């Protein structure tokens, strides 16, 4: 792919663009179409109006909100004709993308998270219409943002999005709750916040670099009859934490399905 046009460069689109640039991709490989973006990174062309685009792009990344597809889709058909369409629109299926952009060469659902900015994001991909060469090129491009994964069963996309796309939000909430619990028990807020963040950061890095599963690592921390085991017993009682997170992912995935119906 020679040139990617990013339409709507908000939090996620901006994180992806920053990640690509950090990975060494030249700024001239990207253009942005966004009437509200204050400025683009140095060397990336920013356009406020589609009429001003030179039309030299080879693919289009849809970075606006899924609820805007009906309003914006028709105006983008000329920009997508004969080009691959990459979509960040949560809940919008490949079939819906094909209906909205019938002249596009192929339609690809893409779901990263904000860690794309630091090249540490999982990137879930599902496609319709890519040939083998374009599939490999797509995998290479999005793999620069972390670790790309093809999802062969698109029906699972909402669930995978809930886990890997929305997951950072749940982790942030856990960090905040861990600090908040310490504050409730008497620790000062700055110390609690700093220790909670450092604890989760270190644990995640250790888990990522270990051959052992997180469950095994938890058991290694917890000596029989010790302090950690006492706390784990609370989390494990009646599978409380597991049940809470199951409900969290179920609600998040259901929202993706609802967005699809709206689209």
Image (cartoon, rainbow, N blue to C red):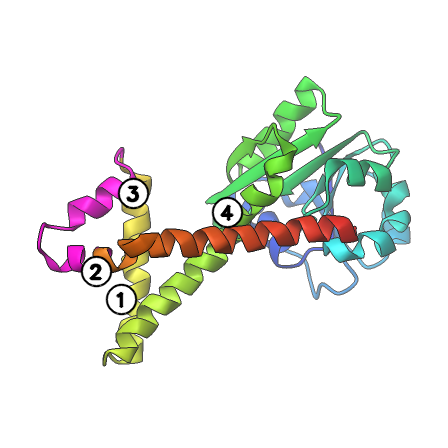
Name the mark nearer the viewer: 3 or 1: 3
Q: Which residue is mark 4?
A: 163
Q: Is residue 148 above or below residue 253?
A: above
Residue mark closest to the camera, 1 vs 2: 2
Name the residue that disc number 1 marks. Answer: 195
Look at discs 1 and 4 and give the one toward the viewer.
4
**213 inside magenta stretch:** yes
Callout 4 secondary element: helix
Residues under labels 1 and 4: Cα distance?
Answer: 25 Å
- Does dot 3 land on a helix, a strand or a loop? helix
Which residue is under mark 2? 231
Magenta span: chief secondary structure: helix
Identity of the residue drawn at 74% across and 53% down: 66
The image position of residue 218, as x and y in percent, is 23, 47
Residue contact between numbered discs 3 and 1, judged by CB atoms under 8 Å: no
Identify residue for label 3: 214
């Amino acid at each position: 792919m020679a040139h990617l046009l990013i339409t709507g460069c908000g939090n996620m689109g901006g994180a992806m663009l920053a990640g690509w640039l950090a990975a060494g991709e030249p700024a001239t490989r990207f253009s942005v179409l966004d009437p509200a973006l204050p400025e683009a990174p140095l060397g990336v062309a920013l356009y406020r109006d589609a009429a001003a685009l030179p039309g030299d792009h080879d693919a289009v990344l849809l970075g606006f909100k899924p609820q805007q597809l009906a309003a914006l889709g028709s105006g983008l058909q000329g920009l997508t004709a004969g080009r691959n369409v990459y979509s960040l629109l949560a809940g919008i299926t490949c079939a819906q993308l094909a209906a909205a952009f019938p002249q596009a060469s192929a339609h690809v659902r893409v779901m990263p998270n904000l860690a794309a900015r630091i090249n540490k994001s999982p990137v879930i991909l599902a496609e319709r219409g890519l040939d083998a060469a374009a599939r490999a090129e797509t995998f290479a491009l999005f793999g620069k943002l972390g670790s790309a994964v093809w999802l062969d069963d698109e029906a699972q996309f909402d669930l995978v999005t809930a886990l890997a796309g929305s997951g950072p939000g749940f982790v942030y909430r856990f960090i905040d709750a861990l600090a908040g619990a310490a504050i409730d028990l008497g620790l000062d807020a700055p110390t609690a916040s700093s220790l909670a963040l450092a604890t989760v950061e270190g644990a995640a890095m250790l888990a990522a670099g270990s051959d052992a599963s997180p469950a095994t690592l938890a058991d290694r921390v917890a000596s029989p009859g010790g302090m950690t085991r006492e706390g784990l017993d609370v989390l494990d009682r009646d599978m409380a934490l597991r049940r809470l997170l199951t409900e969290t992912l179920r609600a998040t995935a259901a929202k993706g399905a609802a967005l699809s119906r709206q689209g």
